[in-house]
Image (tube, rainbow, N blue to C red):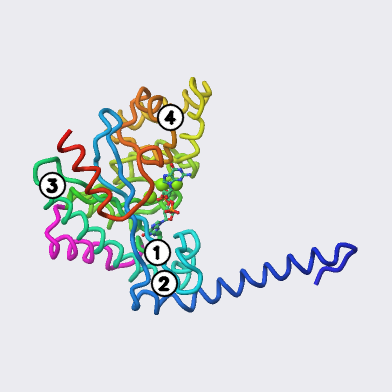
Amino acid sequence: RAKSAGGNRYELADAEADARAITRHGLTTALPAALDRGEFFIEYQPLVHLGDGSVHGAEALVRWLHPQHGVLGPDRFIPLAEHTGLIVPLGRWVLEQSVRQAREWQERHSGAGPLRINVNLSPCQLTHPGLVSDTVDILERVGLEPDSLCLEVTESALIGADDDLLKPLRRLAEMGVDIALDDFGTGYSNLANLRRLPVSILKLDRSFTQGMQQFPADPVDLKIVEGIVSLAHSLDLAVTVEGVETGAQAEQLRLLGCDTAQGWYYARPGPPDRLHDLALIDATG
Ligand code: C2E
Ligand code: MG
Ligand code: MG
Ligand code: MG
């Protein structure tokens, strides 16, 4: 234990670290039962077309309603679930719930273009042998078209990926499932590498969106985003931007040619009926 003149401070820091470790441990051991007890739930955040602001679909974001700690965000428990392997059944649960939800939206909005659903995949799910069969099984049972589903994989999960890792994603892409490269721009991947990956969408990381806060935006940020968008489009990839918080950001990203956007400016993640309401506004004008 560290001892010094500021002894009290060290004790406090130790106590906090201990509390965190206990919570981590407690959360980790509580995870499997939490799935059985139905303590997880999903919020949906709309994705909109930058051109006209209409709703394109939504991203599914998992939360844990912990009986003692209240609502926990994914950053608190996804790493623990990855560590213990629970991410595989949890991820499958998220996928099935989300696919069912998308199907329900589509049934309620037969007129408008089909609403799409984005689901995050963790690296452990990519290497799990059941990924393709589970996904196909869920889509068939629920009756959702593969091209209504987008699976988001982080850029860092695919850096240096060999063909074995890419094979299941390629199979899904051939079926019509979109694969998006999430948090793009944070992983230092080789841009030329993009051609090798079975992705059809780049999700530009929030850090780029932050550079668009002022109007006009930082000229260097503008150049970078402009370059990424033109490269993406020349490779036939669509560009989604995340973390749009202001109208100025939305406008500049639209002018730069980004295709779809997501962020608090449009809507925070929320219950499934909120997306229904937004899509209804679209449909009725
Ligand atoms: P992500 O996939 O990059 O998701 C976007 C995150 O940005 C979400 O955080 C969302 O709530 C937040 N966000 C959206 N709009 C704004 C905005 O305008 N401003 C700011 N500051 N933030 C915004 P969240 O829900 O905490 O999720 C964090 C990460 O957890 C996600 O990042 C994703 O990587 C992971 N995650 C969420 N659900 C799942 C899941 O079901 N499975 C797996 N494997 N990972 C998940
Ligand atoms: Mg995501
Ligand atoms: Mg993201
Ligand atoms: Mg992100």
Q: Amino acid at mark 2?
A: Gly
Residue 72 in the image: x percent, y percent? 47, 63
Gap between marks 2 and 4, in whole Å? 38 Å
Between residues 282 and 260, which one lies in front from this camera angle?
282
Q: Residues within 10 Å of mark 2 (few under 14, many from 20)?
A: some
Indicate left or right for 73 with 12 as reference. left
Location of mark 2 (residue)? 85
Image quarter hosting the N terminus: bottom right
Q: Amino acid at mark 1?
A: Cys
Q: Are marks 2 and 1 in contact (CB under 8 Å)?
A: yes
Location of mark 3 (residue)? 109
Q: Earlier in the sequence, mark 2 or mark 1?
A: 2
Residue 16 in the image: x percent, y percent? 68, 67
Q: Amino acid at mark 4?
A: Gln
The residue segment tinted magenta is 127-145
SS state under label 3: loop
Residue drawn at x 23%, y 54% as measured from the top left: 172
Gap between marks 1 and 3, in whole Å? 35 Å
Between residues 194 and 117, which one lies in front from this camera angle?
117
Gap between marks 2 and 1, in whole Å? 8 Å
Q: Nearer the viewer, mark 4 or mark 1?
A: 4
Q: Amino acid at mark 3?
A: His
Q: Earlier in the sequence, mark 2 or mark 3?
A: 2
Q: Are marks 4 and 1 in contact (CB under 8 Å)?
A: no
Q: Earlier in the sequence, mark 4 or mark 1?
A: 1
Q: Which mark is residue 249?
A: 4
Q: Is residue 112 magenta?
A: no
